[in-house]
Amino acid sequence: MAIAGMLLVAGAAHMPAAHAQEEEAAEEATEESQPAERPSNAPYMRPMSRLATILGSMHFLRKLCGDEEAGVWRDEMNTLLEALAPSDADRRHLIASFNSGYRAFEATYRSCTDAARVAANRYREEGATLAREIGSRYGA
């Protein structure tokens, strides 16, 4: 089962709702043009941020290794954002975490290596575990 799917099943969709999803380009423009707001201190934001980082890393690594379904990780991030409907500050923070995860591996790997495949497998396992923990701890 996909990471965001696990969260939805576990009840993460019942976390506080705020805003509808915007186009990716509009988000980037908004992020750059507005002063930085602090993300909430909601207890689930720290593990959600880590999950977003993992999704970004997985998106890069699977794309690098030629996975035909590599886009699923970006889709999972979008599904996660839709389910959470976070505040603008939390949304920007989660998107920044996703991008940070992507860029961390983009700076390291230029081709799919054994190490990249190992990293992708470890991140997939960590993400699945984290999603279950978030769902059981913070879900309704």
Image (cartoon, rainbow, N blue to C red):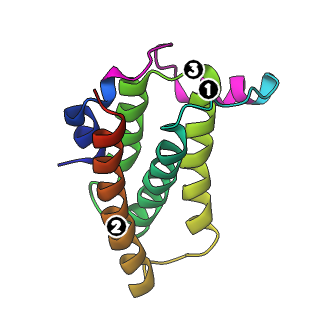
Q: Are marks 2 and 3 in contact (CB under 8 Å)?
A: no
Q: Is residue 31 left or right of residue 90?
A: right
57 or 15, nearer to the observer: 15
- Label 1 vs 2, first from the N-terminus: 1
Residue under label 2, please give it: 66
The residue type indicated by label 1 comes to Glu
Query: Which is nearer the N-term, disc 2 or disc 3?
Result: 2
Separation of residues labelled 2 and 3 (CA atoms): 34 Å
Residue 19 sits inside the magenta stretch:
yes
**Relative to 70, does residue 5 appear above or below in the rendering?**
above
Q: Is residue 65 magenta?
A: no
Query: Distance between the Cα atoms at labels 1 and 2?
Result: 28 Å
Residue 71: tell me if it is visible.
Answer: no
Q: Which residue lies at the image location 80% right of the left edge and 23% below the top edge?
A: 33
In the rendered view, tell whether residue 101 sits above or below residue 45. Answer: below
| Residue sitting at x 35%, y 32% | 79
Find residue 59 and report its horizontal and vertical position in percent: 43, 55
Which quadrant of the figure contains the C terminus?
Answer: top left
Q: Amino acid at mark 3?
A: Ser
Neighbor class of circle 1 (other Cα within 10 Å; few <14, some 14-19, many 20+) is some
The answer to whether 25 appears left or right of 65 in the picture is right
Label 1 to label 3: alpha-carbon separation? 13 Å
Label whose residue precedes the other's in the sequence (1 or 3): 1
* Front disc: 1 or 2: 1
Q: Quadrant of residue 139?
A: top left
Which element carries disc 3, helix, strand or loop?
Answer: loop
Question: Which residue is tagged 1?
Answer: 27
Look at the image and give the residue range highlighted in magenta: 14-31
Residue under label 3, please give it. 87
